Amino acid sequence: MDKGGTKREILDAALELFSVQGYGATSVSQIADAVGIRKASLYSHFSSKQEILDTLFGAIRQQYDSYSLFSHMDQWEAACAADKPSDVPATVIRLILEQVRFILHDPKVSRVRKMLLIVQFSDPQMAQLYTRQNYDNVLHAFTGLVERLIRQGRLRRGEPSLLAAQLCLPVTVWIDLCTRAPEREPEVETLICRHVRQFFAAYGAESGAKNA
C-alpha cells in the first residue's frame, strides 16, 4: 500500500471522526478501523493521535492561507481602489460572499469548524484555537480592510477596530448559523448584502459628505 496514500486516508478519516464526535471521544483504534488498517499500522505513520491532529491543522491552515482572502488583503485593497465610491459596497459584498462560501463548503475547512464547535467547551487548547480563528483573526483582517478603505477615502474616519467589528461580527454569527442550519444559507447571503450596504450607507465617505 502506498505510504503517502495511507497517511492521507488516516488524516481524512480522523478529520471526519473528529468533526462528528469530537477529538477527545475519538480513539486511534476507531481511526484505524475507519481506514481499514490495524492500529499498529497506523502507528507506523503517526506516533500519536495528537500528531494526527497537529498534521491536520498544519495542512488545513496552509490551505486556508493559500485561498483565504483574509491572507491577501492587498487583493481587497486593489479591488476597492479600482471602484468608484458607489461601487465599493458591491465589491465588498462579493469578496465577503466568496469567503463565506469557501468557509462553509470547502470539505476540510467546514469539518474543522464543526470539530472546534464540538470540543471548544471541553478542551481549552481547542477553545483558544476557535477564538483565534473565528474572532481574533477575522477582526484583525477586517480592521486592515477598514484602515485601507479609510486611506482610500471610501470610509469616513473613525476607530478602525470598532468599524471593523460592526462590519464583520454579524457575518461570523451568520456563518455559525449556517454551520448549524445549512438550509438557511440563502437567507444569510441576503442578510450579508443588506448589512454591507447599510454599513456603507452609514459610514461611507459619500454619506458623510451628504450629512455634513
Image: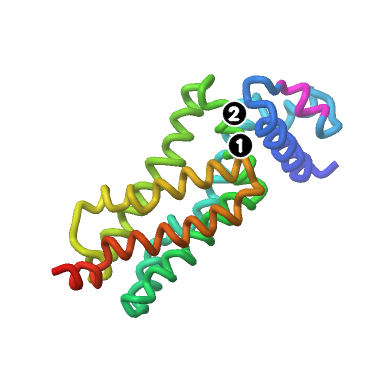
28 part of magenta stretch = yes
Q: For numbered disc 2, what is the local secondary structure? A: helix
Rendering coords of residue 193 (x, y %): 47, 62
- Three-letter amino acid code of the residue under disc 2: Ile
Which quarter of the figure has residue 92?
A: bottom left
Question: Would you name the residue on which mark 1 appears?
Answer: 114
- Three-letter amino acid code of the residue under disc 1: Lys
Which quarter of the figure has residue 44?
A: top right
Question: Would you name the residue on which mark 2 appears?
Answer: 118
Callouts 2 and 1 close, C-beta under 8 Å:
yes
98 part of magenta stretch = no
Q: Which mark is residue 92?
A: none
Q: For numbered disc 1, what is the local secondary structure? A: helix
| Residue situated in front as seen by the camera: 62 or 150 | 150
Q: Please, what is the dominant secondary structure of the magenta stretch?
A: helix
Describe residue 119's horizontal placement relative to residue 84 as left or right.
Answer: right
Which quarter of the figure has residue 14?
A: top right
Label 2 CA crowd tier, 10 Å (few <14, some 14–19, many 20+): some
Q: Residue at x 45, y 64 (%)?
A: 93
Query: Compared with residue 196, is residue 57 higher up or lower down, i.e. above or below?
Result: above
The stretch of residues the image draws in magenta is 27-33
The single residue placed furthest to the front in the displayed view is 211
Location of the N terminus by quadrant is top right
